[in-house]
Image (cartoon, rainbow, N blue to C red):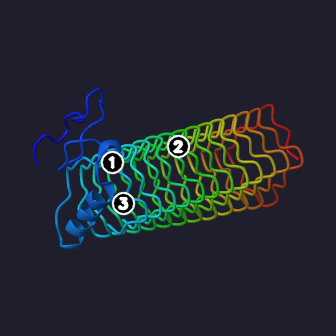
Amino acid sequence: MTGEGSACDRPGCDQPRLSGAGTCWSHLENPDAYRDLQVRTAREGGDLSGLVFTGADFTGIDLSGTNLAECRLEGARLCGADLSRSLLYTARLVEADCGQANFTEADLGRLRAQRAYLAGATLVRAGLGQARLVRAVLDGADLTGADLAEANLSGAYLEGVRLEGAVLERAALAGALLKKAFARKCRGAGAGLRRALASDSDWQEADLSGADLRGVTAVAADFTLVDLSGSDLRGARLRRAVLDRADLEGADLRDADLTGAMLEGANLQGADLRGARLSGARTGGANLEGARLEGTALP
């Protein structure tokens, strides 16, 4: 289609024109007809990849199974839309509104969705490897079984998110808000969670080995049976956290606040606990062989 990526024909408007139209969304004469055409094209097996839909309103429409790879959807409205099993590889959803949208089993690899609104969205088993979700809002979203390997979620809002069984290996979550997140059995080896806020979250049986958890706040979080071996927990705030039978072998817990924490049966072999605060902590059955405890008062 000619003119794609060019500016809107309306004088004084610098917004990009939509694919197959001479204007941007705001200046379309018949936006309903334009939207219906895209849906019909998708339903007939048409390929929408690489098209420009910046600012378009696709609220509630069914684009399931559609090829939208490399599409420009910046600022688009996709609230409640069905994009399950769709292909959105390297698509741009920067500042798009995708609240309550369905992305089940969609391919969102290398998606660019900085500051996008995805609260309440369903992303079950979605592929989000290397996606850019910096400061995106994903509160209450369902990411069960999703692949977020090497994704950038720095500063993202993930309160109450479901991450059970999700892959977070080498993902960047620095400064992310993970309060009340449900992340049991997630695979997050090497993840970066520096200064993340994860109080009241549930990580039971997760793999966070080698993770960067410096300065994380995880008050009353549940790390039962979590693999935290080799992780960096310097200065972590883990007051009243549950770390029963957790594997903390070789972990760096210097200056961590473990006041009132549960560490019964935990493996702390070779861990560095210098300067850690353990007042009121319960360490019955914990393995402290080779742990560094200088300046640390055990309960």
Of the two numbered discs 3 and 2 on the same chain, state the one appearing first in sequence: 3
Point out residue 192 in the picture as x, y percentages from the top left corner.
Answer: 51, 42
Q: Nearer the viewer, mark 3 or mark 1?
A: 1
Which residue position holds label 3?
127
Of the two numbered discs 2 and 1 on the same chain, state the one appearing first in sequence: 1
Question: Which mark, residue 287?
Answer: none
Specify the farthest residue to the bottom.
44
Local secondary structure at mark 2: loop
Query: Tag 3: Cα neighbours inside 10 Å, few (<14), some, or many (≥20)?
Result: many
Task: Left or right? Give the position of 262 relative to 235.
Answer: right
Q: Are marks 3 and 2 in contact (CB under 8 Å)?
A: no
Q: Nearer the viewer, mark 2 or mark 1?
A: 1
Which residue is depicted at the point 75% across and 46% down? 238
Which residue position holds label 2?
173
Q: Amino acid at mark 1?
A: Leu
Which residue is depicted at the point 66% across and 58% down? 246
Q: Quadrant of residue 152?
A: top left
Q: How many discs appear?
A: 3
What is the C-alpha distance between the residues marked 3 and 2? 17 Å
Local secondary structure at mark 1: loop
Point out residue 84 in the picture as x, y percentages from the top left corner.
Answer: 37, 69
Task: Left or right? Give the position of 274 relative to 149.
Answer: right
Which residue position holds label 1?
73
- Asked if residue 250 is positioned above or below residue 85 in the image, the reply reads above
Task: Left or right? Give the position of 263 relative to 191.
Answer: right
Q: Nearer the viewer, residue 26 or 79?
A: 26
Of the two numbered discs 3 and 1 on the same chain, state the one appearing first in sequence: 1
Point out residue 110 in the picture as x, y percentages from the top left corner.
Answer: 32, 48
What is the C-alpha distance between the residues marked 3 and 1? 18 Å
Specify the farthest residue to the left.
2
Which residue is depicted at the point 46% across and 62% down? 101
Which residue is depicted at the point 59% across and 38% down? 175
